[in-house]
Image (cartoon, rainbow, N blue to C red):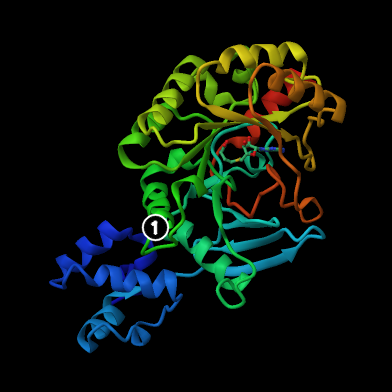
Amino acid sequence: MSEQKLQNLFDLNRTQLTQWLVSLGEKPFHAKQIMKWLYHERVCDFDAMTNLSKTLRAHLKEIATLSFPEVITDKTASDGTRKWVFRYHCGNSIETVYIPETDRGTLCISSQAGCALACPFCSTAHAGFNRNLTTGEIVVQVWLAKKLLGCGDNGKRKVTNVVLMGMGEPLVNFNAVIPATDIMMDDFGFGLSKRRVTLSTSGIVPAIEKLKEVTDLSLAVSLHAPNDELRNQIVPINQRYGLQALLKACHEYVSHNAQHGGVTWEYVMLKGVNDSLEHAHQLADLLRGIPGKINLIPFNPFPGSQFECSSKNAISAFQRYLSDSGYVVTVRKTRGENIDAACGQLVGQVNDRSKRYKKLNRYEVEHS
Ligand code: SAH
């Protein structure tokens, strides 16, 4: 059988793997056994899966595979942040970042090769867009990061949290992303709790509306502006799905499950663009009544970016205004800067198939 026709097992969540096995005439319970080998033991040689019958092992060798990208770059920043560039068979490469902290380790993963949305302050947008990643290409980032970090070998470095905040808009790639997050939260997969798997979206409203039917992961929303006029410019998807519809969908998502921690509202601090006290005032009014917290992100510059980060004083004043208005507000610490691993600096190497540059240049002309 040719390589392309083999079933990549990283592409299947537990339900899908069970169905696939059953369709082959195998017993459904083998799905749990196989997943334990893959995700708990990190064994990827079918012969070593010793509690499977010899016949099943031989069968798997014939029809299944585990597909890995090539590790192109492996860099560690002075603050311990580690960044990998993984290249998939199609030639596109994406970036995955590990951020260690005293009490946890967060892995920031990508969901697309590039991004088709044109947020002008994000370097991924400037790289253009090639395609959605498959479930397996998303899952394998966690698998490989854990292996390369030696998780389980010394018990020290652990991936305790996964955030879909790398390259791409995860909700544009809904059908691949959701099974991937299922595997992250499955006890037979990576076993992370729903509080520790966070999907960040720029606000694809119909997908947020669908989300509650299929998952209860944590939701972060790239808000970045407190009114439609400004958001239309810096998060252009807002022209399609405006703030009112976005907030309604988010409110419904977090109300659906009483144990939900609320929305994390991400707000990038752009000097002179969205960082005045008037903006803070509008934001406080806008978010009133929706469970959640606000995360202010200092803007990370990249070559060719036409924005500047707000001053420390402006960020503190913005934060103070919002906390005085009753919100929980944190300021994200910038990590991994000296290896271009910070938010919005991930570009990979994308064979652009979009007209990205045209759109971004239009923004630059309008605002120069
Ligand atoms: N497409 C998704 C996830 C990717 S980006 C989304 O929009 O949420 C993860 C976060 O980093 C988003 O909040 C994004 O707006 C922010 N970001 C992008 N570029 C940035 C930059 N240059 N500096 C700081 N934050 C940035």
Q: Is residue 347 left or right of residue 245?
A: right
Q: Secondary structure at mark 1?
A: helix
Query: Label 1 amino acid?
Result: Ile
Neighbour tally class for label 1: few under 14, some 14-19, many 20 plus, Cα within 10 Å: many
Q: Is residue 293 left or right of residue 172?
A: right
What residue did someone put label 1 on?
Answer: 183
Ligand 1 image position (quadrant): top right
- Give the farthest residue toward the left: 25
Would residue 331 be visible to someone looking at this image? Answer: yes
Residue 244, image x, y percentages: 48, 14
Residue in the image at 47% along x and 22% along y: 246
Q: Nearer the viewer, residue 163 or 115?
A: 163
Task: Name the quadrant of the N terminus.
Answer: bottom left
**Quarter where residue 187 is shown:** bottom left
Residue in the image at 34% along x and 33% along y: 210
Residue 175, image x, y percentages: 36, 46
